[in-house]
Amino acid sequence: MGEIAIRTEQLTRRFGALTAVDGVDLRVNAGQFFGFLGPNGAGKSTTIKMLTGLLAPTSGRMELLGLDFQQNPIDVKRQIGVVPEGMGLFERLTGSEYLHFVGRMYGLDGPTTVKRTAELLDFMQLADREKTLIADYSHGMQKKLALAAAVIHGPRILFLDEPFEGVDALAAGALKSLLGRMTERGVTIFLTSHVLEIVERLCSHVAIIHQGRLVAQGSLEELRAGIPGAEGEKKTLEQIFLSIVGQSGAEQARLEELTWLT
Amino acid sequence: MADLNQLPGVAEQLKLVAGLRWNLLKNNLQSKNNRWDLIGMILAAAGGAVMVIGLCVAFYAGTYFFLTRGRASWMQLLYWAIFLWWQVVPILVAGFGANFEFRNFLRFPLSLRAFYILGFGYGFADFAAVSSLCWIAAMLVATAVGRVELLPVMALASLLFVLVNVTLERLIGSWLERIFANRRAREVLVGLFVLSMVSMNFLNPALQKWGGRETQPNILQLIPYFSWLPASLPGNAVDAASNGDFQGLAFTFAGLLVWLGATSGLLWLRYKAQYLGEELSESGAPARAKRGNHRQAATTTLPGFLSPPVAGVMRKEFHYLTRNGFSFITLLLPPVMVVFFSMQFAGNNSMVKEHGLPPQAFFPAAMAYLILILLSPAYNSFAFEGRGIQSYFMAPVRMRDILVGKNLFLVCVVGLELTVSLGVLIWRIGFPGFPLLLSTVAAAAFAVMGQLTIANWSALSFPKKMEIGKMKGERNSGVAVWTAFGVQILIGGIATVVMLAGGWFGKPWLPVAVFAGLTAAALGGYLASLDPLSSLAERKKELLIETLCR
């Protein structure tokens, strides 16, 4: 078994009476492309916020690259990159100014920051908009810039919250290639997305959270094996997901009621 | 095929919109925070009602007086007052913010006619319109009591006046909506608005210097040209009716009808453009920039002794300042205000020579005023970060680096401003002598240093989101305002006592020494506070992220 990149023990977060994340035990090996799935409101974003230092857990433990997050937040943050929900951009900076700012915040020296900024802007096809304020970027351009900012310091773990939302097919293809190369070099990628086809294509391992609790975790093959079905039939991730968290029978009954529409 | 038997009529659509507005208001008031807004609204409504009722009495009395004393031509003044109120107040209340609420109805299957009537109906639903209608009603009652024979003319002229006002206000609002949809235009207009407000301060000195009686005839010559404006015409109609001048009466009504036709036609064209899907994009297509420029721009560096995060934050603060029209103008204001105050209250050219302040009082007072202006943003220093606040918590830095970067940049700005302002003061009033000059500088250093720690605590504890290019509701949180107020009174009090002590004891250098000691103590306190404030930021990060990313 390889090095463990992310490990949580009984990770819990409560908001008043609501328990958004309830005793989650995650284990992600280094170099894995890991998909973290769940229906709306399941606790995905809350978990990713805790794992990236944007939200303090109510209880439980988080260990990234062998370091206790709560004990060594700075050392952990130095080694992770994040595209958070909402992207966290300073909209009144230009693309190059923002990347330069982020590079400096991660402690890169000036010349390295400038070089990487130029290379990333080129790669993300944003070089011709380097003088444009981020506020004037399209959603997809902002997403690409947030991704560039997340990798500028060469992180060992990358957290991506819906990274391909709004990104055109051309750029998405290039990004997927980049992420694939990164995992080959041992970078761990922790990805949440509602587009299950993307997760199925990119991720080797998946965890599913439902109503704050981790209900499945493992490689795609392991998850398939745990789902009953015809011999030799290869279940898609969507079928696995629906069989674990979906209520397809109830959905069907509700659909039947919409006679005026269906 | 959609299961639609018949689209709702215009009246039904108006009813639906009114219901929607009511539900929005009701739901808005259900959250705890908004209950305070409700109390504020009740108090504001009570104050507004008192003002409207009070002015109803004034309009009644004015109308009665003008009509019964043979001064019907003066009725123009009353209509002009209403006209200016009706047209200007909605612009100020809109607060330079893009408001797309009305346009949102376009997603529903409305006819252009219904869209126009809805837009027109909205024109009667703001405070300026309601209060104006009350005042016009008071004028009509006064006419009925004083000169009942003029009532039909007055009523018809007022009706046309009301229609012109509503269509004109909606027309201006529609154009402003289009202009303010563009971020850059919005920011430029906010800057121009602030500058125009500031320039008002110079009206009095300018009038005193150049506004002699000899200029008045020139101004009076312009008055006839105003008579064809919509605010003059109703008064002229009443005056013509009062004098039995039926030709004049016909001309004024024709003029009002022409105005109504013009504003209605233009409003129809504006709404038609919106109805047909006018582009109100937040940003135009930016010009393509030459590649490689960023290499040069990004290599401009700050002093090497600064850590990369502190330097990064300072550079980011600089970019934000230069792109925030309001803040940038606030930065330009202090020397301008010093010139203004020196013209009004001190120096050789004082407008009030016999009451002019001596340099001993004016130098410290002017500096204190400037610090009051310049330090206020520090009490809500994360206001403009928006979603970028997450970057601070994701990056491997402690909040102390962020705070030091922000504070250092502010100190540089304040230092530059005070230096320029002191130069302007010396030019306007004269050199005050080294003891007073150095005491003032030392007092300023103490006032800045003494505030930074509490300002940082306030910024972390009571953040409030602000948006560049907006004015409506753009202010620090109530607690931050009162904290700043209390600290500034305390520091101002200490500084005043120390300054006066130099005079009492006959030791002009005493304040310099005392302020130097106080500044050193404040600096020590500031440095000691950075780690506790970093811990506080960790505890408050959810509040900060939630408030600023909203």
Image (tube, rainbow, N blue to C red):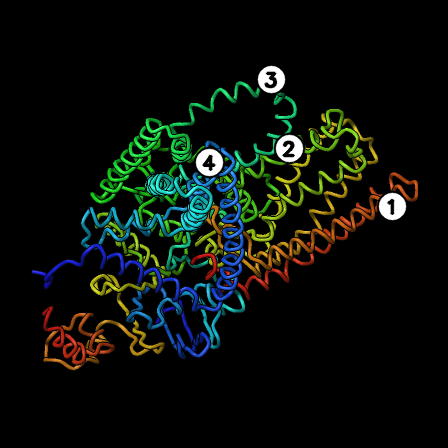
The answer to whether dots 1 and 3 both sit on one chain is: yes
Who's the residue at 30% across and 47% down the image?
B120
Closer to the chain start, of discs 1 and 2, is 2
Label 1 – label 3 distance at C-alpha:
51 Å
Closer to the chain start, of discs 4 and 1, is 4
The amino acid beneath tag 3 is Glu
The amino acid beneath tag 1 is Ala
Residue B304, relative to residue B10: is it above or below? above
Disc ID at residue B335? 2
Q: Which residue lies furthest to the left in this view?
A: B1
Label 1 – label 2 distance at C-alpha:
28 Å
Residue A49, relative to residue B339: is it above or below? below
Please, which chain is the residue tagged with disc 3 on? B
SS for tag 3?
helix
Closer to the chain start, of discs 1 and 3, is 3
Closer to the chain start, of discs 2 and 3, is 3
